[in-house]
Image: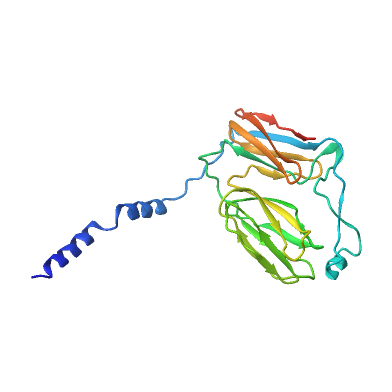
Amino acid sequence: MRGLPIFAAALLAAACGKPPVEEKKAVEAAKPVEYFHVDAATAGTVAGVIAFRGAKPARQAISMEADEGCQKAQAGKPVYDDAVLTGKNGGLANAFVYIQTGLEGKKFEPNTEAVILDQHGCMFVPRIIGMRAGQTLDLKNGDAVAHNVHPMPVNNREWNQEQAPQALTLEHRFARPEIMIPVKCNIHAWMHSYIGVVDHPYFAVTGADGAFQWNDVPPGDYTVAVWHEKLGKLEQQVHVAAAGSVAVNFTYR
């Protein structure tokens, strides 16, 4: 008879099922993800140019004397750290421009296409990368020398990955948005890259013309921001009307 209370308690626990918190989590996990879909009839366009005016900083020469393999990869040509790179009409390259605020509460379908970060000529290529949270980052080493990829995030997991010469591609992901994640090579101190991670599709890395354009932007009020590794960050407030087109230009001086 003394075992009856224990048996009764077991029956009671079985009848009650999972604790409320666990049951709620299980129900939420079972729900399909509801993605936000832009209405093509009301979607707008945001376009602009990032420019630099004034005297550019002096070019910084890179010495690769410490690694004969890197010197061979560059065929003996001089190498410069062109952080401030401009094109025709002062267009600024390697600027990361993105919608900073205004998309809260909207969950967009993930991008399943991989983004590539290569190591070529003992330099990271490209220098600036934009990608989505959860998107695959393919790490490649096209050089005949060993490299090391070491991102240093604040809002994501840090990792440090060595790659043998011309090694197989490695995959990594960043779970959360972060602007910007610096990347270095622990073997070659001159190698630098930066990764901008966002949770929506409205971002771009500028080319030599400094131009960017986003289509299918839902109507609303936004903060558009641009980041540059040497020139800092600029912001603008933007209103996108239904089926409207907005010009957003930034000038660094």
Quadrant containing the N terminus in the rendered view: bottom left
Instruction: Name the foreground residue: 219 vs 237.
Output: 237
What percent of the width, then of the height, locates residue 99?
Answer: 63, 39
**38 over 69 or under it: above or below:** above
Answer with left or right where residue 150 lies relative to residue 25: right
What percent of the width, then of the height, locates residue 132?
Answer: 61, 50
On the image, which quarter does residue 116 sit in? Answer: bottom right
On the image, which quarter does residue 206 sit in? Answer: top right
**169 over 18 or under it: above or below:** below
Answer with left or right where residue 12 lies relative to residue 108: left
What percent of the width, then of the height, locates residue 193?
Answer: 73, 54
Coloration mode: rainbow
Q: Residue at x 64, y 64 (%)?
A: 160
Instruction: Name the foreground residue: 164 vs 192.
Output: 192
Quadrant containing the C terminus in the rendered view: top right
What percent of the width, then of the height, locates residue 151?
Answer: 66, 58
Task: Give the farthest residue toward the left.
Answer: 1
